[in-house]
Image (spheres, rainbow, N blue to C red):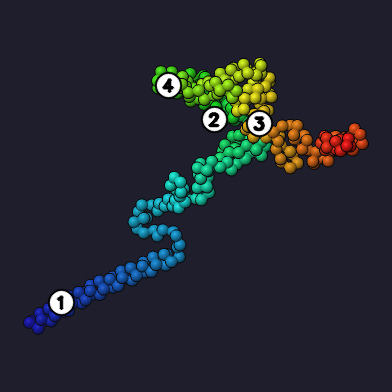
Amino acid sequence: MAFIKEESEDVKIEETFTVKQEDLQEQTDLMLLKEKTHQQNEMEEIQQDMTTDEKPTLTKKTLSRGRPRKSKPRCNFSCKQCGKSFSQKPKLNVHIRDHTREKAYTCKQCGKSFYNTRNLTVHMRIHTGERPYTCQQCGKSFHKTGNLTVHMRIHTGERPYTCQQCGKSFQTTGNLTVHMRIHTGEKPYSCPQCGKSYNQNSNLEVHMRTHNGGRTFVCTQCGKSFAQKQNLDLHMRIHTGEKPYTCTECGKSFPYKSTLKHHMIVHTGEKPFACAQCGKSFTCKPSRHTTDLQR
């Protein structure tokens, strides 16, 4: 009986040793599996870094937050005059014109130039007649949104610009500026003939009638006067450089219709001026040719 007891105890010890050895083997296999998996993950990350150029690596941290945020563009182009920075050189070039006052965009119909394309687009509506901004109350249309905004104050009664000295209000900044001259005594409009000054251009125009013998339309730039406003408008093109008449053949522009008509002779070959003495034709009045014949 003692022999059987000892044998059963040996069997129990052997079974316990076998179970422990099997548990140890399982733990060892599990550790090897984890280490192999970790190595595979590292290799996949390295391959992903090599195959992606500038794309950010999606780690567990970034995946938990969703897609990675796009980085803001770097401002590598800086203005040397004011220090303002831009992400693209063309944007810097446009900004530089604020300092140089360069007018790089020119109207092909009249030759007037502008700082940017937006101002040129608005100006072109003068030639096309386009008025895209319409008052919903009276139906009047305008070239610019700003003109419509000012016009709407007629209906609303709004006067947003107030004089700080007397409290009087105005619909536009221009009207406020003119009003402020009452307080400051400024008189920027001077008569080119006698030197007398006025705070408004309209007052100068009334004064100029005393010099021009009833010619009511006076050029504020040079003092020349005209009997009709139409003639003054034509004269003002000398100062503004406006050239509304364009040649359809070559694109050249002119300030007056008569100069365009004379220019067209270059393309048509027409010679409308003939010498009364010999009958020879010319593109312009043959004053020199006539003088030569008289010698």
Q: Which residue is mark 3?
A: 237
- On residue 12, the disc is 1
Amino acid identity at mark 3: Arg
How far apart in space, not on screen, are marks 1 and 2 (Cα)? 100 Å
Label 2, secondary structure: give it: helix
Q: Is residue 33 left or right of residue 110?
A: left
* Tag 2 near tag 3, CB within 8 Å: no
Could you tell me which residue is drawn at 71 percent across and 41 percent down? Answer: 251
Amino acid residing under circle 2: Thr
The reply to whether dot 1 and dot 2 touch (C-beta < 8 Å) is no
Q: Nearer the viewer, mark 4 or mark 2?
A: 4
Residue 145's label in the rendered image is 2
Residue for point 36% across, 52% down: 65
Q: Nearer the viewer, mark 3 or mark 4?
A: 3
Nearest to N terminus: mark 3 or mark 4? 4
Cα–Cα gap, marks 3 and 4: 36 Å
Q: Nearer the viewer, mark 1 or mark 2?
A: 2
| Residue occupying image coordinates x 58% and y 21% | 194
Q: Quadrant of the N terminus?
A: bottom left
Task: Give the amino acid type for the residue marked by disc 4 in the picture.
Answer: Cys
Name the residue that disc number 4 marks.
163
Which tag, 2 or 3, sits closer to the chain's start?
2
Q: Nearer the viewer, residue 60 or 196?
A: 196
